[in-house]
Image (tube, coloured by chain):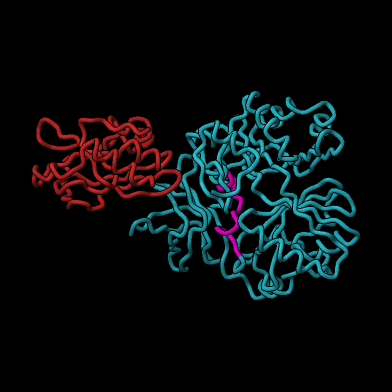
Chain colours: A cyan, B red
Amino acid sequence: MGHQTPLYKEHLAADAKMVDFAGWDMPIHYGSQLEEHHQVRRAAGMFDVSHMTIVDLRGADTRAFLKYLIANNVDKLKARQALYTCMLNERGGVIDDLIVYFMQEDWFRIVVNAATRAKDLAWIKQQAGAYQVTVTERPELAMIAVQGPQARERVYEVLDAKLREQAAQLKPFYAAYDAEGEGEVFIGRTGYTGEDGFELLLPGRNAVRLWRALLEKGVKPTGLGARDTLRLEAGMNLYGADMDETITPLECALEWTVAWEPAARNFIGRAALEKQKAQGVARKLVGLVLNEKGVLRNHLKVVVDGVGEGEITSGGFSPTLNKAIALARVPAAAGARCAVEIRGKLVPATVVKPPFVRNGKSLV
Amino acid sequence: MSNIPKHLKYTKSHEWVETQKDGTVKVGITDHAQDLLGDVVYVELPRPGRLTKTGEACAVVESVKAASDIYSPIAGEVVEANGALSDQPELVNKDAYGSAWMLRLKPANPAELDSLLDARGYESFIASEAH
């Protein structure tokens, strides 16, 4: 038996099929992954993502430390604003991707992947050495993501007046925080589905009440299966599939998260990235759409005629487009067409720029 | 609890077999199998005329989760594939023993059907697999 989130019993009560995910017993679906996927695209769904690792960085040097630790630049952030970034090793390889929230001058909150928790924490503590910063994991906090075109409305209905007012003011990628009630509540207008919505962080003891209140408002529990197809349609990378420590942001379509300016900011991995950029990047991450019936799967070989070969890093069936889609790493010279080898046959696919779907609408 | 109709025969790879009046057999996957697979989004079937050996992979079912081979329960010739599954793969989840039959086989040796599991045998097999 693995770790259980505070919502474990709620999942069982909702007839979830539970699977192991990075040592956690998590719901993969509650009956139909396809229906849960559509629910998020068309109305609102909620995910228990309490397995994710929440870490508070506090102290006088927190900002300076983060400017060194991560490839994006926290100086871009206004108060309570969030930033997506990679944390790199010296070779420019991605140790993890994460979201950092600017809480106050001596406090930033980061959320990292559950599967990389131990190595992330070890790396962060190791790099923090000379800085005045404390690294505090917050395992007592649960995390519920409510996503979909109706998600914000449904969340407003279950918040008290003060929080509701704060949440209603939030622009995308901003967060509200209230520590005065009967337990802190953090609400970020962020997510991993390509839909509008919130991610709510609150003490585990209060999570069941929030989950049930949302359920009563018609928000459907959504499993990790749909979370994966939603993020794939949204063209969002998955750590461990689309990138890892051998892949730089320039090779996984995340150069936009690298803050090259100011040139004087020396972040970990910068020298390696600059060298790679100067020499030219040999591979790129692109989107694929299969025009025939079938399903694209991780690790299938991609053949680009006259150019070379690549590999699918995340493949699946897009419920919104009703066809197979994928993220694939291919030679940089690849154009608009390629073929995927499926069970010994080369099947033509179109190369596109993700996202495939955003806010419920097809973009391909 | 899985639905395991009494009148069908079964394999340990979770296919069901139903003998037709003309001596051919329909083949599909069990309710237990579709439940393990999750939502089915694509079914790839063999062409009529194909000869299959016992236990040979002859079709593929792809769900949101994974691709799974379907194995021929007996040796024979494919006389018909269920074209409806091409446009409605979700039938496999909704009606595994009915409209979601996958192929019809003409057995090479009808006596081979006796070697398949009956409902009780299949039920104890999946119970043993769960442990």
Query: The C terminus of chain A lies in which quarter of the figure?
Result: top right
Q: Is residue A234 magenta?
A: yes
- The main secondary structure of the magenta stretch is loop
Q: Can see residue A293?
A: no
Q: Is residue A81 left or right of residue B59?
A: right
Q: How many marks?
A: 0
Q: Is residue A316 left or right of residue B14?
A: right
Write down the region rendered in magenta. Answer: A230-244
Q: Can see residue A223?
A: yes
Measured as percent of width and height from the top left, residue A132 is found at 88, 64
Pick the front one: A337 or A155? A155
Residue A121 in the image: above or below residue A268:
above
Picture quadrant of residue B126: top left
Pick the front one: B8 or A258? B8
Identify the residue at image location x=64%, y=48%.
A51
Q: Is residue B113 left or right of residue A99?
A: left
Q: Is residue A65 magenta?
A: no
Identify the residue at image location x=85%, y=56%.
A58
Measured as percent of width and height from the top left, residue A83 is found at 76, 52
Residue A334 in the image: above or below residue B95:
below
Picture quadrant of residue B6: top left
Measured as percent of width and height from the top left, residue A134 is found at 83, 59
Measured as percent of width and height from the top left, residue A138 is found at 75, 50
Q: Is residue A90 left or right of residue A288?
A: right
